[in-house]
Image (cartoon, rainbow, N blue to C red):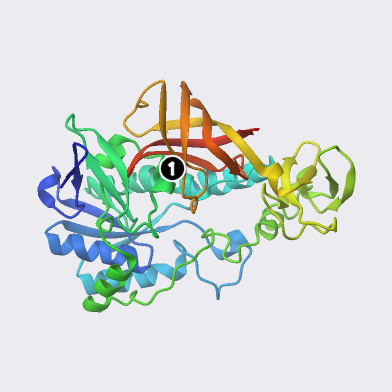
């Protein structure tokens, strides 16, 4: 299938790839299980690999909870691989995950920003550390259960595209992948919906067919970031951002006290512990001064933003200045914008003001269904 001059790869056709040996990242969920089944049935020499990334002791949680990529999910993945009829192995990537994802998560939060750990996990773990393990097993290709697609340009370079199921599209978390990464990647579920995936799992009798999805960060299964940060720093002197500080209004007047600036994020409304007689929102965080600034809803609006650490999927931007759609959060529908590039940074001007432009979150640039690239929000421009 061709779209805008790009040939859309199905992620299931062996003839599109120079090798047929593929390692599927099996998390113990329904998506990766079906992805493995589809590839095996298509004629790929398929191997299931489950990454061991963390333990409950690392994260201070009870063993009756479930996340992904921990010991509790490896058995689910192994049973699914058995039904599919493929070999299954576990690979220990805990050290890399600790260094590249968890340490970064803690550092970014303590700096007063809001991190995107799933982006780093994809770029640094799945497409670096995991891919290295796959290559060691003779697998030149890797596959995942992400709802995204890959397109090939006439010059052979690849682009990332949104998944057909808009409600499950995961391209936002994959902006860090370059053309070379995509050339060795298969997304067998990019053309399906979640409902179709579950139906495929049931039809094959996969034991993961009814597995529910986690909506939280995998290593914070209770969604309590403050608890996680305290656990990670247990026994060490607390940094200023985890100690009590002042809540200020936009004029610098003290309105109350907070337990630590790192416990807040831009746009937050609940749990502020102050009563102003009107809704109040976090509009700024200064980790160095350990202050949280609150304001009205309109104070969250920004005309644009500065984005840093940009990676363009094909290795270059469409132009020094171009128009596109930009998404500033996973569930954000996107807004038309003009982008002015400067190396791996860009200044973005929104067509209409956007609320809660949050430093540390990802900004992803789209041309229709095509992901042009992405980066991290440095600061809003008001």
* 149 relative to 275, above or below: above
Q: Mark 1 points at which residue?
A: 124
Residue in the picture at 40% in, 45% down = 174
Q: Residue at x 81, y 39 (%)?
A: 250
Q: How many marks?
A: 1
- Which residue occupies the foreground of this view, 54 or 346? 346
Instruction: Answer whether residue 35 is visible to the viewer in this image.
Output: yes
- Vertical side of 372 occupied by 56: above or below: below
The vertical placement of 200 against 244, above or below, is: below
Q: Quadrant of residue 361?
A: top right
User: 10 Å neighbourhood of mark 1: few (<14), some, or many (≥20)?
Assistant: some
Residue 48 percent across, percent down from the top left: 28, 61
Residue at point 65% right, 32% down? 382
Q: Is residue 271 left or right of residue 133?
A: right
Residue at point 54%, 72% (across, down): 65
Q: In this view, does 246 lie to the left or right of 34?
A: right
Query: Which quarter of the figure has residue 159?
Result: top left
Q: In this view, does 288 lie to the left or right of 368?
A: right
In this rendered view, identify the residue nearer to me: 326 or 19: 326
Q: Which of 56 and 336 is in front in this view?
A: 336
Which percent across, then down, holds residue 230?
Answer: 72, 56
x and y, in percent, of residue 108 in the image:
63, 42
- Residue 184 visible? The answer is no
Residue 233 position, x and y percent, is 71, 52
Quarter of the view holding residue 154 = top left
Say which element carries label 1: helix
């Amino acid at each position: 299938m061709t779209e805008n001059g790009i040939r859309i790869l199905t992620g299931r056709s062996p003839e599109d790839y120079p090798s047929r040996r593929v390692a599927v990242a099996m998390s113990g969920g329904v998506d990766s299980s079906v992805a493995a089944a589809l590839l095996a049935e298509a004629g790929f020499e398929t191997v299931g690999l489950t990454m061991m990334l963390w333990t409950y002791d690392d994260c201070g949680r009870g063993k009756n909870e479930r996340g992904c990529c921990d010991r509790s999910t490896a058995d689910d993945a192994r049973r699914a691989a058995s039904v599919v009829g493929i070999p299954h192995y576990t690979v220990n990537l805990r050290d890399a995950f600790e260094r590249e994802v968890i340490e970064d998560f803690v550092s970014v939060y303590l700096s007063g920003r809001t991190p995107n750990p799933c982006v780093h996990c994809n770029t640094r773990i799945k497409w670096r550390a995991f891919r290295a393990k796959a290559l060691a097993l003779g697998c030149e290709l890797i596959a995942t259960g992400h709802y995204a697609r890959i397109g090939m340009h006439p010059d052979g370079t690849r682009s990332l595209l949104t998944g057909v199921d808009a409600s499950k599209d995961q391209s936002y978390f994959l902006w860090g992948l370059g053309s070379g990464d995509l050339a060795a990647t298969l997304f067998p579920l990019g053309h399906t919906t979640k409902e179709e995936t579950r139906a495929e799992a049931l039809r094959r009798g996969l034991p993961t067919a009814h597995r529910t999805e986690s909506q939280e960060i995998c290593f914070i299964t209770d969604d309590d970031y403050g608890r996680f940060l305290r656990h990670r720093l247990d026994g060490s002197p607390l940094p200023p951002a985890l100690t009590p500080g002042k809540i200020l209004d936009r004029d610098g007047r003290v309105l109350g006290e907070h337990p630590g600036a790192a416990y807040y994020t831009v746009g937050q409304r609940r749990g502020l512990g102050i009563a102003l007689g009107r809704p109040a929102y976090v509009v700024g965080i200064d980790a160095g001064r350990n202050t949280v600034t609150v304001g009205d809803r309109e104070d969250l609006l920004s005309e644009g933003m500065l984005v840093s650490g940009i990676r363009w999927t094909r290795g270059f931007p469409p132009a020094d200045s171009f128009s596109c759609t930009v998404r500033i959060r996973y569930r954000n529908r996107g807004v038309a914008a003009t982008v002015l590039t400067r190396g791996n940074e860009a200044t973005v001007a929104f067509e209409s003001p956007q609320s809660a432009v949050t430093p540390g979150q990802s900004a992803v640039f789209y041309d229709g269904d095509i992901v042009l690239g992405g980066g991290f929000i440095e600061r809003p421009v008001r």
